[in-house]
Image (cartoon, helix red, strand yellow):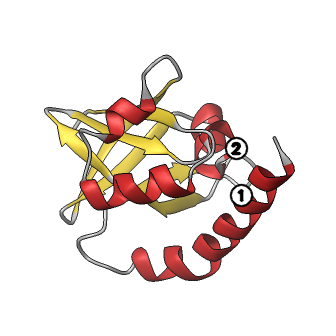
């Protein structure tokens, strides 16, 4: 990773971790992704922007496999997603062969613009929901 991308990654993730995420998880309309911490085993909630298509929830990670929640998914793909206040259980899949930039065009506009602007290693993910 280039020096610029590393500095950008650290600045953005610090801002998100300390300010944006703690506020976002409290908003009732915010979509939340819940993973299991790979070391702690505790539930970890992260606000995400994506879209439900049938029984599949699609979203794009800004930092790909460097994102903590993606690392948690690699350790345990069982996830929960809160959409419109309702929790759904499912199994998440990393889709490195999917065109993440093209996928962003089909996802909510505001979140997609932020992910495009801040992301350095985009990765598409899909959760197959079971309930």
**Residue at position x 69%, y 45% from top?**
38
Is there CB contact under 8 Å for labels 2 and 1? yes
Q: Quadrant of the C terminus?
A: top left
Number of other residues with Cα within 10 Å of mark 2, as a class: few under 14, some 14 to 19, many 20 or more: few
Q: Is residue 39 left or right of residue 88?
A: right
**Residue at position x 63%, y 80% from top?**
18
Number of other residues with Cα within 10 Å of mark 1, as a class: few under 14, some 14 to 19, many 20 or more: many
Instruction: Give the x, y percent position of residue 72.
Output: 62, 43
**Residue at position x 42%, y 54% from top?**
33
Q: Is residue 122 left or right of residue 25?
A: right
Residue on which disc 1 sits: 9
Say above or below: 30 vs 99: below
Instruction: Give the x, y percent position of residue 42.
Output: 62, 58
Q: Is residue 36 left or right of residue 95?
A: right
Query: Between 108 and 131, which is closer to the camera in this rendering?
Result: 108
Query: Can residue 114 be seen here?
Result: yes
Q: Is residue 23 left or right of residue 29?
A: right
Q: CA distance from mark 2 to mark 1?
A: 10 Å
Mark 2 vs 1, N-terminal side: 1
Instruction: Give the x, y percent position of residue 62.
Output: 54, 48
Q: Quadrant of residue 84?
A: bottom left
**Residue at position x 63%, y 76% from top?**
15
Query: Between 42 and 128, which is closer to the camera in this rendering?
Result: 128
Residue on which disc 2 sits: 66
How many numbered discs sit on the rendered protein? 2
Q: Dot 2: what SS?
A: helix
Q: Quadrant of the N terminus?
A: top right
Say above or below: 30 vs 81: below
Instruction: Give the x, y percent position of residue 122.
Output: 54, 38
């Amino acid at each position: 990773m280039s020096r610029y991308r590393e500095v950008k990654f650290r600045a953005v993730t610090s801002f998100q971790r300390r300010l944006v995420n703690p506020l976002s998880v409290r908003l009732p309309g915010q979509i939340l992704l819940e993973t299991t911490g790979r070391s702690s085993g505790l539930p970890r909630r992260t606000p995400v922007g994506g879209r439900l298509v049938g029984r599949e929830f699609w979203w794009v990670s800004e930092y790909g496999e460097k994102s903590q929640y993606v690392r948690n998914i690699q350790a345990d793909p069982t996830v929960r997603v809160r959409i419109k206040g309702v929790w759904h259980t499912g199994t998440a899949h990393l889709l490195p062969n999917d065109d993440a930039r093209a996928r962003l065009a089909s996802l909510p506009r505001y979140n997609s613009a932020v992910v495009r602007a801040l992301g350095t290693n985009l990765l598409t993910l899909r959760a197959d929901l079971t309930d």
